[in-house]
Amino acid sequence: MKNKEKKRIALIGSTGSIGTQCLQVVDSLPEKFEIIGITAMTNFKLLAKQIIKYKPKYVCIAPEKRAELERELKESSFKANFEYAEIADIVRREEIDLVVVGVPGFASCEPVFNAVQAGKEIAVASKEAILCLGKLLFEEAEKKKAKILPVDSEHSSLWKLIDSYPRENIKKVYITASGGPFWKHDKSKIENAPYEEVIKHPVWNMGVKITVDSALLINKAFEIIEASYLFSIPAEKIGVKIHPEAIVHSAIELKDGTFIMSAHFPDMRIPIMYAMLYPYVEDIPFEIPSIWEKPLNFFEPDFERFPSLLLGWRCAKLKEPFPCILVSADEVAVEYFISRKIRFWDIYTIVEKTVSYFEKNRDELPSPMMSIEDVKKIYEISKKKAKEIADSITKKT
Ligand SMILES: NC(=O)c1ccc[n+]([C@@H]2O[C@H](COP(=O)([O-])OP(=O)(O)OC[C@H]3O[C@@H](n4cnc5c(N)ncnc54)[C@H](OP(=O)(O)O)[C@@H]3O)[C@@H](O)[C@H]2O)c1
């Protein structure tokens, strides 16, 4: 489409951290975007405000929250003129040009897959969908001429670098990790880190699930696999460096010994805007602090204190369905941690044990992974095993 035309957007997860920042981008560039559909799970108060402001045609919220949403809209004397629709239906609508997906966990798979099947452009923040659907997603995207546009800051910045250099000249790629709140802590302190400290990320203000994953660095394990799928790079050619300032998000190493780094102030609106405007680039419409005054430090990751990171290379090499097993087991373990049933370190133990179990018992899972139904089965079977392991841990403590 031409740069002068407005992109019509379906925003999946509009009340979350990615969703609200996507709407800030829309507010900053109103001549570029129009919100056609928005969806949330339970946050009817914020969704009502968004409906009043953006007047979408389609809305989705959990059915048990509709009455509260309608009451909220009535109280503000808003004359509602939207249609309720399922997420699967919204992302497929003819009038949608771009689908933005910012839903955590396995729940992101269907919206992403449905949008791909409808041949849309999809800005994907939800790395879990990329990991779980894997090759299936990219093959379907090719068939349906859908475009998967990365939103994660590391992958967005890597995309810019990889697009600018001939593939044969790229020896290795790197993504950075801020290290989260515990990168300097002793192992014993990390093992028993309380929930309140785990959810205090030093750089990013994100949803609870990704904040927990980031503190353990399992989020970075996801991102190794995400990069491998997005850019068709073998996992062994993807490196990770700890960079507490989170200014440099990725780098490529060229054959001739040059490193090209991609940097921006850690503000998710930058990668979100890049994916939303693609293939066009506009002047940044909001104030961003300078990056030049900060020193930049880089460290090697410590696998003794952050063994979760190794699961990224391991599951990428094991190939499908292991990235999906990783996501499913992590979803269970993080839920147990948020409900205060297990210690912080137990998340790693549960995920590692689930992966190891299926390494020895591959025949319990559908193989090869041919359809979204297979992916759902893998998710259910892995979750069941992860729950058994989690319950055995809770009984011991
Ligand atoms: N936040 C970041 O800076 C960031 C950066 C890179 C990547 N990501 C990725 O982006 C995704 C979203 O992260 P986030 O931090 O934005 O999460 P978040 O703040 O928790 O927001 C999640 C959004 O999804 C909705 N939602 C939750 N569960 C759902 C379900 N089962 N079905 C449909 N909608 C559901 C929520 O609705 P309610 O508000 O009504 O519950 C909310 O709108 C994750 O995959 C994360 O890894 C996030």
Image (cartoon, helix red, strand yellow):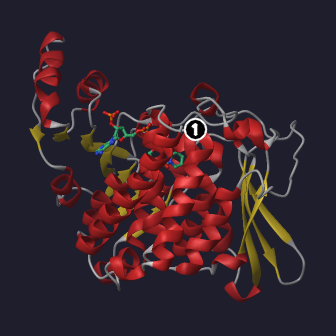
Q: Splitting the image into four quadrants, where does ligand 1 fall?
A: top left
- Residue 171 showing in the rendered view: yes
Quadrant housing the N terminus: bottom left
Residue occupying the point 80% across, 74% down: 253
Q: Nearer the viewer, residue 199 or 238?
A: 199
Task: Please identify the quarter of the rendering in which residue 364 is found.
Answer: bottom left
Q: Is residue 377 left or right of residue 252?
A: left
Percent across and percent down for residue 305 are: 76, 50
Task: Please identify the quarter of the rendering in which residue 375 is found.
Answer: bottom left
Q: Nearer the viewer, residue 18 or 223?
A: 223
Quadrant housing the C terminus: top right
Number of numbered discs visible in the structure rendering:
1
- Residue 3 showing in the rendered view: no
Give the residue number, with chain letter if any, for mark 1.
343
Q: Secondary structure at mark 1?
A: loop
Percent across and percent down for residue 293 are: 88, 36
Eyeballing the image, is 315 above or below 65? below
Residue occupying the point 68% across, 84% down: 167
Percent across and percent down for residue 2 are: 38, 62
Eyeballing the image, is 88 above or below 83? below
Eyeballing the image, is 369 above or below 12? below
Percent across and percent down for residue 217 are: 65, 51
Residue occupying the point 49% across, 79% down: 360
Residue occupying the point 64% across, 71% down: 313
Eyeballing the image, is 143 above or below 174? below
Q: Is residue 287 left or right of residue 176?
A: left
In the image, what residue type sits under mark 1?
Arg
Q: Is residue 182 left or right of residue 363?
A: right
